[in-house]
Amino acid sequence: MVVRPAGPRNVGMIVRAATNFGPCELVLVAPQRPSLLVHPEFEQMAHGVPRAKQACRVVATLDEALAGSTHSVGFTARTQENRERDAWRTVRAELAARAAQADECVAFVFGAEQGGLVSTEVARLAQLVALPTSGEHTSVNLAIAVGIVLAELFQEAPHAPRERGRKAVSFEAREFLKANLKHVFADRVARTESARRDILESIERVFSRAPLEDRDARAWHLMLRALGSTLTPRELGLVVNQHDERHAALRSAALSKPRVLLVGAEELVDKARSLAAQRGWAVASSPSAEATARHAAFEPGLIACFGDETELAALRARFAQARVVAVRAQAEVAALLADVPRPDPGLNPGC
């Protein structure tokens, strides 16, 4: 949470950082500019974040922001009220582990751009922490400070999209390339037995260790074809293109995941969706108990509803096979998901 922020650019950058390293809730306490969340500079710096304005909860007081938290940590570059400040590097692992617990709600509190946290705000916080800097300049920009902390708290598996056109060659494709090279250069080009032996050893040594991509293998096969090779993987008992088999395996793994339907307001469901997906669940959502035929076809085994008894009753009537549970907070969703063992991840798409 950020207390008394004034700069729309800073807040826009913080929204992006919270999205990069979430899920987490961003709370703005008594912003100094009423127009902060509709300012063009906020929209510019939060570019690409869906519903950036809705990602911020605005409250009037720090006490209101801290309501429901189990621990609070204030970040300050200066000593105040004779309070001891912990060094971030010494406490970050402990705080990250605590924040990851389903029954904990840890508030990380940052002050305004000018002056940071004041003494009355510091007095409301359980722990003070200082970020390490050089002695030349000890003040850290607000958005940068938040980004540093969130990045080091982030514990989920990072998203690493594969670059287009760059795909490592599979073991089977590598073996076929080596066989084709040996077929042409050792069996057809070598004039003596010693030359053949040297070529075989060199191909095995170089092409077993080289970091090859599919496009490299294609280029070599084109050269070998130009030299008269007609060798195919099938002749060697190899299956190089396993795309169809892999697709079927991935689809089977996806269908084996437990399924949860989240029912409630968009801002509540969005956070719960991220949490459920990270824990290995297949997720669908609906803004109300009036679920569609698509939700029925999803066949959820568990329904978490942020609604009232009327909505719960409607869901139980429509989804007789599912366990329908009322939830009020993200911690309850986390506990509910933990009640069911996480599914076996099966085939890892990254392998």
Image (cartoon, helix red, strand yellow):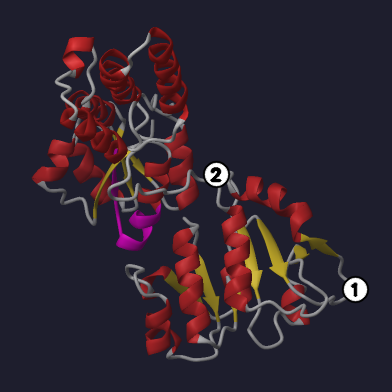
- Up-down: is 334 above or below 230? below
Which of the numbered marks, if any, corresponds to residue 102? 2
Which residue is located at x 68 percent, y 77 percent?
140
Which of the numbered marks, if any, corresponds to residue 82? 1
* Residue range corresponding to the magenta coloring: 260-271
Under mark 2, the amino acid is Ala
- Up-down: is 228 above or below 145? above
Quadrant of the frame with the N terminus: bottom right
Residue 253 in which image quadrant = top left
Front one among 185 and 78: 185
Visible residue check, residue 321: no
Residue 260 in which image quadrant = top left
Give the image location of residue 41, x and y in percent.
42, 87
Which of the numbered marks, if any, corresponds to residue 264? none
- Up-down: is 254 above or below 332? above
Give the image location of residue 155, x and y in percent.
55, 47
